[in-house]
Amino acid sequence: MKKSGISGQTTQQCHSLWAFKQCLYIGFFDIDEYVNMQQHKSIPEFLASEVSENIGSIALCDRDFYNPDNKPTNSFNFLKIYNCDKIILDKRHKHFVIPKKVQVISVHHILLGKPMHIVNENKAYFNHYLFLNKLTRGKNKTSMKDNSIDVHTKNLF
């Protein structure tokens, strides 16, 4: 398997695996990525429904979100921006890793340990708000919209 090329992030993730080996799960997500559960109300409930003996992580597919109209992103306003692409099923997964079952992870892939379990996108995926951490990206105009995160954010507004 090809290495990620992001050695700092890989080093951080592997350090976390070893430092927190006794944890049930470690979520490896970036600050602009949010879990979007489609069938559960809480992350612990969701994780319990997906875990099995033979997996090293619960991996979520990616859905990229854009802000082509430069809507406000302060506070939690970015969660009301719904422009997006189709869910990416075959790459760029992010994980809830089971540290006792994984020795080496490199951003989107388990390199040593039990295999990742890819969650069906009808159960959950992660929203990647591309426009949050880099001003020059995330401006794509799309006709697709996804407001399904609203069920989890109604108390924020």
Image (spheres, rainbow, N blue to C red):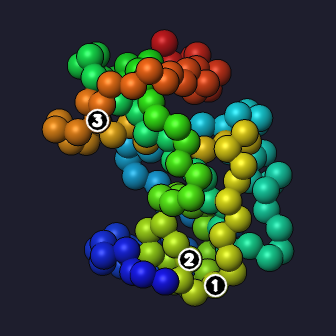
Distance, label 2 to label 3, CA atoms, is 28 Å
Secondary structure under tag 2 reads strand
Nearer mark to the viewer, of 3 and 1: 3
**Which amino acid does the dot numbered 2 rest on?**
Ile
Do we see residue 97 in this rendering?
A: yes
Residue lying farthest left?
136
Residue at which label 1 appears: 113
Residue 142, given in percent of the width and then of the height, sits at 39, 25
Residue density around tag 3, few if under 14, some if 14–19, many if 20 or more, within 10 Å:
many
Q: Position of residue 16 (x, y in %)?
A: 47, 73
Q: Secondary structure at mark 1?
A: strand
The three-letter amino acid code for the residue at tag 1 is Gly
Q: Are marks 2 and 3 in contact (CB under 8 Å)?
A: no
Query: Residue under circle 2?
Result: 110
Res 15 seen here: no
Residue furthest top in the image: 157
Residue, x 68% and y 59% (percent of image)?
118
Q: Which type of secondary structure does the marked residue at label 3 adopt?
A: loop
Q: Earlier in the sequence, mark 3 or mark 1?
A: 1
Q: Which mark is residue 137?
A: none
Crowdedness near tag 1: few (<14), some (14–19) or many (≥20) residues, C-alpha within 10 Å:
some
Whichever of callouts 2 and 3 sits on the residue coming sooner in the sequence is 2
Q: Percent from the top left, x then y, of residue 34?
A: 50, 41
Q: Position of residue 50 (x, y in %)?
A: 79, 56
Quick check: marks 1 and 2 in contact, CB under 8 Å?
yes
